[in-house]
Amino acid sequence: MANISENPVQGLVLAEEYIERARALAKKNKRTILAIAGAPGSGKSTVARLLHEALKEISMIVPMDGYHLSNKELERLGRKERKGAPDTFDVWGYKSLIERLKNQQENEIIYAPEFYRTIEEPIAGSIPVFEDIPLIITEGNYLLLSQGKWQTLASIFDERWFVTAPVAERQQRLIDRHCYFGRSEEDAKAWVAHTDEPNAQLIEQHKQNVDLDIEWRNI
């Protein structure tokens, strides 16, 4: 298992081997979909962002989180207190988007939704994807989950990366994130313990078809 480390002068740095691996994917003669999965707080979004920053001209990030069900729909289903669990996403909607992206037509713009933490809601049509971008980086918790509807996704990705982090670091990162977006520390710790952590254990125990394992340290 490879490591990502922190450069104390320049900040977080993604290992060159990962950048070159992704660059090679972008040189294929077709649109390539790179999936980056991992538990909540593992660092997968940061890996995706650093990868895109290194390959800005040839890549685009399309997150899975845009397919969160709305708070209104979660209330109707009685699932709002488990927001972020596998059954609180529109899996088929996300899968349809990835299939469209794999077969994007010339001069076609495909619009993807994006999740905004400031309002805790997804907004449709937020991310325009142009047909001349060879590498789509998609990231999310359940992309490689071997259960339920999610298990149908792994085969549509061209390459699958999985990011892990030490449990204590991952949990603290989540607590800090929840507090930043308005929860009290007590509520944040409770949400991590009763919602995020059970999801994390499910993800790490039931991942499938991984091409590359990445261990994130010292974020």
Image: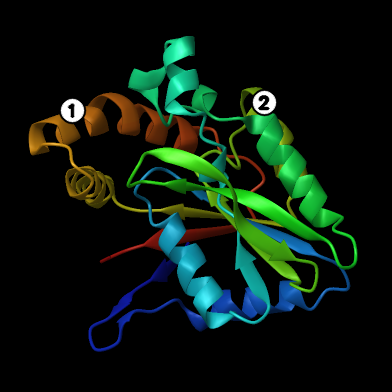
Q: Give residue 135's quadrant in the image.
A: bottom right
Residue 108 drawn at (x, y percent): 84, 61
Query: Label 2 near label 1: C-beta < 8 Å?
Result: no
**Closest to the observer: 21 or 54?**
54
Mark 2 residue element: helix
Q: Which residue does the image show at 60% across and 42% down from the upper left? A: 143
State the residue at coordinates (76%, 71%).
134
Give coordinates of residue 148: x percent, y percent.
64, 22
- Local SS, label 1: helix
Q: Residue at x 60, y 58 (%)?
A: 127
- Total labels drawn: 2
Residue type pointed to by label 2: Lys
At label 2, counting other C-alpha atoms closer than 10 Å, the crowd grade (few under 14, some 14-19, many 20 or more) is some
Q: In front: 70, or 175?
A: 70
Q: Is residue 3 left or right of residue 182?
A: right
Q: Residues within 10 Å of mark 1 (few under 14, many from 20)?
A: few
Image height of 30 relative to 164, above or below: below
Q: Which mark is residue 149?
A: 2
As drawn, 26 above or below 127: below
Between 42 and 213, the residue placed more toward the observer is: 42
In the image, what residue occupies the spot 33% across and 33% down? Answer: 196
Outermost residue, bottom side: 9
Dividing the picture into quadrants, the one containing residue 192 is: top left
The location of residue 105, given as percent across then percent down, is 89, 60
Q: Which residue is mark 1?
A: 190
Q: Which mark is residue 70?
A: none
State the image coordinates of residue 26 (x, y, percent, origin top left).
74, 74
The answer to whether 14 is drawn above or below residue 34 in the figure is: below
Q: Quadrant of the C terminus?
A: bottom left
Q: Mark 1 belongs to which amino acid?
A: Ala
Tell me: 176 left or right of 170: left
